[in-house]
Amino acid sequence: MLLNNVYQSSEAKMQKALLAVEHDFTGLRTGRASTALVDGVQIEAYGTKMPLKQVATISTPDARTLAITPFDRGQIAIIEKAIISANLGMMPNNDGSMIRLSIPMLTEERRKDLVKMANKMAENGRISIRTVRRTAMEEVKKLQKASTITEDDMKKAEKKIQDMTDKWIKDIDARLAKKEKEIMEI
């Protein structure tokens, strides 16, 4: 029973590490329009800072364009300034009712930089998973020292935790390979 708690807790934490890596990957600009590119943009509206998606509709009319349509047209200049100050590497094109962001083509050098960034993000995920493994292994050893589980159970638990770790790291590596391919193909 105690080991099951360790397994379930570790599995959930490892899954969160994978989801964090996936979320980080969505923020990488790959040359394709994605609404995730403006997720970090904060707008000063109605006396408070709020995410862009709370004050505007964000869509991708084509593979190289983001269209941002504010709910309140009076906010368009504020949104434009926030996009510029967010330093996204794109200049907004304001037509009075909507803002368009054209995603520029990526140079070979920039693609290689993006691949390096993706590798760092994946490595951070792997480190998180290994940290979860270390914590789980310590818990199992404590259970064995307290004579709650046998030494054989401890060995089986350590193997199961290691297998779980290998599985989640393999998932991160697969997503990294997919992201690298996506970045380099454009």
Image (spheres, grey):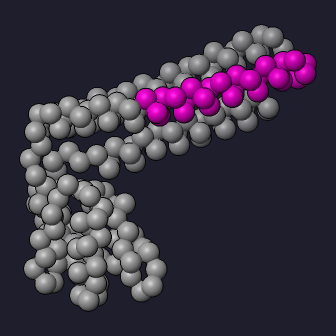
Q: Is residue 96 magenta?
A: no
Provide residue 169's location: percent of width, then percent of height.
46, 26
Residue in the picture at 38% in, 32% down = 120
The answer to whether residue 178 is visible is no
Q: Nearer the viewer, residue 4 or 107?
A: 107
Provide residue 45's location: percent of width, then percent of height.
38, 82
Q: Tell whether 41 sits left or right of 157.
A: left
Quarter assignment of residue 91: bottom left
The answer to whether residue 179 is visible is yes
Residue in the picture at 50% in, 21% down = 166
Magenta span: helix, strand or loop, mainly?
helix
Residue in the picture at 59% in, 35% down = 11
Q: Which residues are magenta?
A: 123-149
Provide residue 181's location: percent of width, then percent of height.
20, 32
Q: Tell whether 84 sits left or right of 101.
A: right
Q: Nearer the viewer, residue 82 or 151?
A: 82
Residue in the picture at 42% in, 40% down = 21
Provide residue 83's location: percent of width, then percent of height.
26, 67
